[in-house]
Image (spheres, rainbow, N blue to C red):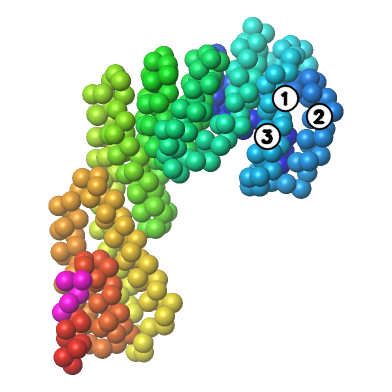
């Protein structure tokens, strides 16, 4: 665990590349991190040395240590009088009149670092509205720049990012536009991750999470610009649904039908691991289908499933590497118990 990495944790919602900074009051250029670290060292002295010693042989994956050492560091840094010129500030090449606002924004976020960390750790639960209000409410007094940066920080990791934007906008309408832009960028990046996922299982995972986020965006509409939100979300839904459908149709052939055909053609029974992988692929396809349907491609999935089912059933004509029960299980996962019934009935009558 590195001191500067720990120090920067509450600032991540504000950090941007230096080229993208544009002196925004809600942003901190990454080139300011080294001067901020030096300023905190100068202000806290031996306390920083003690924290660094405690960081040794620990990692950022150690949640308890991050929370304990972070609380110790952030609270002290947030109330310290920090140098705003000279030394690393000069070497960073930032405008002299920009360092004060950067330090003020960083200090405001450090003062609330403990609450922000706790809220980030509840990201998979939304975070809940109660957590968001308890976290963002006190930051309002720090000014709109700090509230905006905190909002972006929480929004980027949230399972329900539109909820974060909605709560923040309720505290201060001035952050609504920035939060809305951050939400759109997040969902667009998420949609890209779905389309470019390297495996069927990862695509299903990403698609399920995106669907949840889009449904959250439907539930927590912005106080203004609802039509713009609707158009943006519709475009993301359409493009992602098409990507899911395309991968589903291809996966039915390459990940399922070809695999079943290969196993069925074996001279001896397929081993359990091969059958397990086949069933896993079928489950991933079914999850991808479910997500795609929620995005709005129902009829296309109906057609693809209707086309593949008889082709799978036909492979049961001869006993081979897959038993009828194993094939029936795959058909059941993909198309439901009713579709697999002919295989089970035939087997029972044999």
Q: Is residue 216 above or below residue 78?
A: below
Considering every residue shown, the one lying at the far top of the view is 97
Q: Quadrant of residue 35?
A: top right
Q: What whole-number distance in Å separates the C-alpha atoms at marks 1 and 3?
A: 10 Å
Secondary structure beneath dot 1 equals helix
The disc at residue 76 is: 1
- Name the image quarter holding the C terminus: bottom left
Residue drawn 24% across and 71% down? 332
**Per the image, is 87 magenta?**
no
Instruction: Compare marks 2 and 3 and give the one earlier in the sequence.
Output: 2
Q: Which residues are magenta?
A: 337-342
Residue drawn 70% across and 19% down? 79
Nearer to me, 277 or 62: 62
- Name the image quarter holding the N terminus: top right
Q: Which residue is mark 2?
A: 47
Side (left or right) of 293 relative to 42: left
**Per the image, is 338 magenta?**
yes
The answer, for residue 206, to whether it is visible in the render is yes
Considering every residue shown, the one lying at the far right of the view is 46
The percent coordinates of residue 31 (x first, y second) are 65, 23
């Amino acid at each position: 665990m590195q001191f500067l990495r720990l120090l920067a944790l509450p600032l991540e919602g504000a950090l941007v590349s230096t080229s993208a900074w544009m002196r925004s009051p809600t942003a901190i250029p990454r080139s300011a991190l080294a001067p901020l670290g030096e300023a905190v060292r100068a202000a806290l002295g031996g306390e920083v040395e003690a924290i660094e010693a405690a960081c040794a042989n620990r990692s950022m994956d150690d949640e308890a240590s991050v929370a304990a050492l972070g609380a110790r560091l952030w609270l002290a840094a947030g109330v310290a009088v920090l140098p705003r010129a000279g030394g690393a500030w000069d070497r960073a090449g930032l405008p002299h009149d920009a360092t004060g606002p950067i330090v003020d924004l960083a200090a405001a976020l450090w003062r609330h670092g403990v609450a922000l960390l706790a809220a980030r750790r509840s990201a998979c639960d939304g975070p809940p509205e109660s957590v968001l209000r308890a976290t963002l409410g006190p930051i309002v007094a720090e000014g709109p720049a700090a509230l905006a940066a905190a909002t972006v920080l929480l929004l980027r990791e949230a399972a329900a990012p539109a909820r974060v934007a909605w709560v923040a906008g309720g505290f201060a309408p001035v952050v609504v536009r920035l939060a809305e832009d951050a939400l759109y960028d997040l969902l667009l990046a998420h949609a890209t991750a779905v389309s470019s996922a390297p495996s069927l299982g990862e695509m299903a995972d990403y698609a399920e999470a995106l669907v949840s986020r889009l449904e959250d965006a439907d539930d927590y509409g912005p106080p203004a610009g609802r039509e713009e939100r609707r158009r943006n979300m519709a475009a993301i839904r359409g493009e992602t649904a098409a990507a899911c459908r395309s991968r589903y149709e291809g996966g039915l052939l390459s990940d399922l039908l070809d695999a079943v055909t290969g196993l069925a053609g074996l001279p001896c029974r397929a081993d359990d691991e091969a059958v397990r992988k086949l069933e896993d692929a079928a489950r991933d396809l079914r999850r991808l289908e479910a997500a795609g349907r929620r995005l709005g491609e129902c009829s296309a999935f109906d057609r693809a499933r209707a086309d593949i089912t008889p082709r799978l059933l036909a492979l049961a004509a001869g006993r081979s590497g897959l038993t009828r029960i194993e094939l029936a299980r795959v058909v059941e996962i993909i198309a439901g118990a009713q579709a697999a019934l002919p295989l089970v009935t035939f087997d029972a009558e044999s």
